[in-house]
Amino acid sequence: MLSPQQVTELKDEIDHCTKPLIFFDGDNDGLTSFLQLYRYKGDGKGVILKSKPNLTLEHVRRVEEYGPDKIFVFDVALVDQEFIDAVKVPIYWFDHHGPYDRTGGHLKYINSLLWDSTTSPCVMIYQICQKDLWIAALGAIADHQIPYFWKEFVTAYPHLAEDRVYNGPFDVRFNTPLGILIKVFSFNLKGSTTDAMKSIKIMSRITGPDEILNQETAQGRFLFRKYQALNKEYEFLRKKALKAYSKEDPFFIFKYTENQTSFTKDLADDLMYHHQDKVIVLAREKEGHYVMSMRTSESGPVIKDSVERALVGLEGSGGGHAHACGCKIPQEHFETFISRLREELKMPKKTSKGKN
């Protein structure tokens, strides 16, 4: 969490901002961070980063086109030094990856890992703005955290989550109506950037969660029906993935070819919750590469460092959090990567008789 002094200073910067440009990662943490700030300010421009979660020199054009007085960056794993050097307005980078060494007097790097925390950006921005409790809770649970304001949330929205003891954020996600909202938000980010931004514009005007869940307005119906349509595709893929399950193998590996819609992150979380004894590896084939999402349970092995070591020399890239990582490698290096990861985690594939 942010300190009281950080909250005061950052709120003052936000309150005295007139034309913010907001870059955010294309998942629910990034999305809900953007929505909170945008709805609090009632102004600004959002830029979603869907294909690659980092800011480069290529994005300077967006800054020059819009002419912001301040830039906010949410849940973006990497901001290139070249981008920072090229941009002359203040940058406020909220994150919980890395952390990375960056310089620039106009850069404020608010990374919770710098003070030994894993607080998500969507939780930090709620500390500052104190607006849209349900959106902040949605983002936190989707990002594998039960936030400090959870008691306040279940009191205000008992129909979204009961006031009881939960066995972690995945228990909330897969056993409450809030979990349905998480899928609605996530699925509305699917498709082209244009399609995603259309849904995000609608989300920025939603008055509350029931407008979506009960389809009370045309805006709520639009978001919910997009979710329903994509959920059919998701459930088909989920059933296909379950056929790859092996009781003997400590890894749950599912490879599939590119479809119109990517559900890799969503399905990885789903399979992890229902198979907490496994290392989940979902690999989607795309343009000669495998784009992967990997998960372990909170009681399972930490995979971040192992994934990074297994990638060395394989022309790939990746990283993430202790129990949730993503990476991209050429198809021909996939088996080598998996073999290395098994060695790193000391979890070799077993035969049905229990032999290696």
Image (cartoon, rainbow, N blue to C red):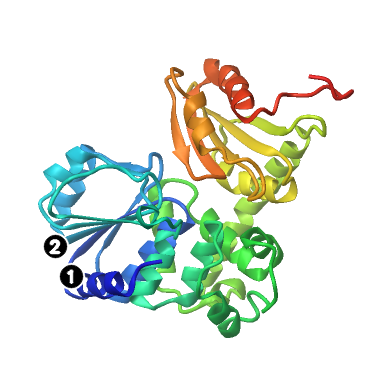
Give the x, y percent position of residue 225. 59, 62
Which quarter of the picture shows residue 132? bottom left
Give the x, y percent position of residue 283. 59, 31
Label 2 SS = loop
Q: Is residue 201 shown to the viewer in this render?
A: no
Q: Is residue 94 shown to the viewer in this render?
A: yes
| Apparent side of residue 115 relative to residue 13 in the rendered image (left or right) | right
Vertical comparison of 98 with 310: above or below: below
Q: Residue at 47% x, 69% y: name it.
A: 136
Q: Name the amino acid type tagged 1.
A: Cys
Judge by depth and name the residue closer to the eye, 40 or 108: 108
The residue to which callout 2 is attached is 69
Label 1 SS = loop
Question: Dot 1, crowdedness within 10 Å: few (<14), some or many (≥20)?
Answer: some
Vertical comparison of 190 with 325: above or below: below
Vertical comparison of 52 with 13: above or below: above
Hey, which residue is sitting farthest right in the picture?
353
Give the x, y percent position of residue 186. 53, 55
Hey, which residue is sitting farthest front in the picture?
116
N-term-proximal mark, 2 vs 1:
1
Judge by depth and name the residue closer to the eye, 92 or 342: 342
Vertical comparison of 188 with 353: above or below: below
Question: Dot 2, crowdedness within 10 Å: few (<14), some or many (≥20)?
Answer: some
Q: Are marks 2 and 1 in contact (CB under 8 Å)?
A: yes
The residue to which callout 1 is attached is 17
